[in-house]
Amino acid sequence: MRALSLFSGIGGLCEGVKLAGFEIAGAAEWDKFAAHNYRLNFPAIPLFEGDVAELLPDDGEESARQHDEFVGDGIDLIFGGPPCQGFSQIGPRDPADPRNELYLHMTRLATRLKPRYVLIENVPNMLLMKRGMFRDRILRALNEAGYDNAGVVVWNAAEFGVPQARKRVFILATPSAELDVPVQDILDATGRSLQAPEVTVEEAIKDLPDRVVHDGETLPYPSEDAPSAFQLEMRLGEDGQRYGHAHKQRHYDAIRESVALHNHHTKEIQSRRLALIELLKPGAKANSLPKHVWDNARPEKWRRLAGDKPAHTLMAQMHRDLSEWVHPRLHRWITVREALRLQSFHDGFVLETSEWQMLKQIGNAVPPLLGYVPAMAVRYAESIRTGTKAPFSVRGQLSLFQAAS
């Protein structure tokens, strides 16, 4: 199956969709720094760098050229996460924010290209803002475009093997003429079936060196005698359940010639801040500090990760301040590589641009191992539609097939 990626960022959702067995026919991203890292990590995927409104205009030579480059023989799935700052709980939550309407470009292109499925990702607050007004608008727009069989789920990445508590909304839709089983049932069954054991921060990053380097430098790739199951997913030269050795090595070989540990660098720390974080115990917040140290402001301003639990949510604001993401054992901030691990990007995934931009891009990304799940829901829906074998063992599969018969 072939898919078109919109609002691609550095490609977290794309990597998840690829893991589910899709061919990514093309991608679109307007931010030049994210686009640079997308090209670096997906050199074979055509990337439209610019305003998505200018992708596949109605007619003319440019539209025909873009169709040949990004669509080719057709698209089965359009997917993407329109920018969420207009919905985000920590943002301004302005109903008039023009970014709130970017999903309309997904329905515009769905009307034009007629893929069988449309997948939209966003933050949970999108369902709550203005009493669900934007959820209803998105579902109405999908319905008007012909995608009247839709389902909505809120999934926590930590429930699917990502070492981070990170909730995201996924909306999947298809025409009821194509599939008479409720998409909601398919999403629910997929979520139940693909849940994975919880992964802690230490299980995710303990094999990475204590030592850090400057931005742009590398370290020898670390050895590990007893890697955790998650480290097998992440490490080059190892086979995991999702990321096979060959998949990671092909990805890495397209970027670098010799194996090394990239992006293991972080922001400098001033002596005053160092003295403060030395007082933080694993999992503790600022309100655990002595009164003369903490100014009684927001407790999450200072926060050390708990090594024995998944990380709390990584955010784009890491680029400004990492004080909420202190290493669980060491008196420093987490590194770019450690942030990538906590987002479930394997070690073959390398970032360039500035450290400031890297942290912002990681915080904005969809964890690939979370993105894999809705993509597998599409695969499951397609197996029901075509009467072929489901792509994984599905709890409640019999009842779904009975509904389809």
Image (cartoon, rainbow, N blue to C red):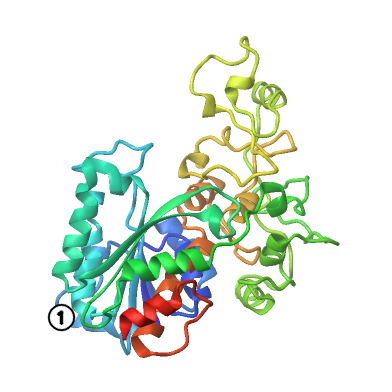
The answer to whether any part of residue 279 appears in the image is: yes
Q: Is residue 219 left or right of residue 60?
A: right
Vertical side of 92 occupied by 224: above or below: below
Which residue is rendered at x = 23% and y = 80% of the image?
114
Camera-side residue of 189 and 44: 189
Packing grade of label 1 (10 A; few <14, some 14-19, many >=20) is few
- x and y, in percent, of residue 199 in the image: 65, 54
- x and y, in percent, of residue 260 in the image: 74, 63
Quarter the N terminus occupies: bottom left
From the image, tell me which residue sits under label 1.
60
- x and y, in percent, of residue 154 in the image: 40, 54
The answer to whether any part of residue 46 appears in the image is: no
Camera-side residue of 309 and 232: 309
Quarter the C terminus occupies: bottom left
Which residue is rendered at x = 30% and y = 76% of the image?
181
Task: Answer with the quarter of the image where residue 139 lies.
Answer: bottom left
Vertical side of 284 occupied by 84: above or below: below
Camera-side residue of 398 and 24: 398
In this view, the residue farthest toward the top is 292
Vertical side of 61 occupied by 328: above or below: above
For label 1, the SS is loop
Which residue is rendered at x = 75% and y = 60% of the image?
228
Task: Answer with the quarter of the image where residue 30 lies.
Answer: bottom left
The amino acid type found where label 1 is placed reads: Gly
Camera-side residue of 360 and 240: 240
Q: Is residue 403 left or right of residue 44?
A: left
Q: Is residue 193 left or right of residue 204?
A: left
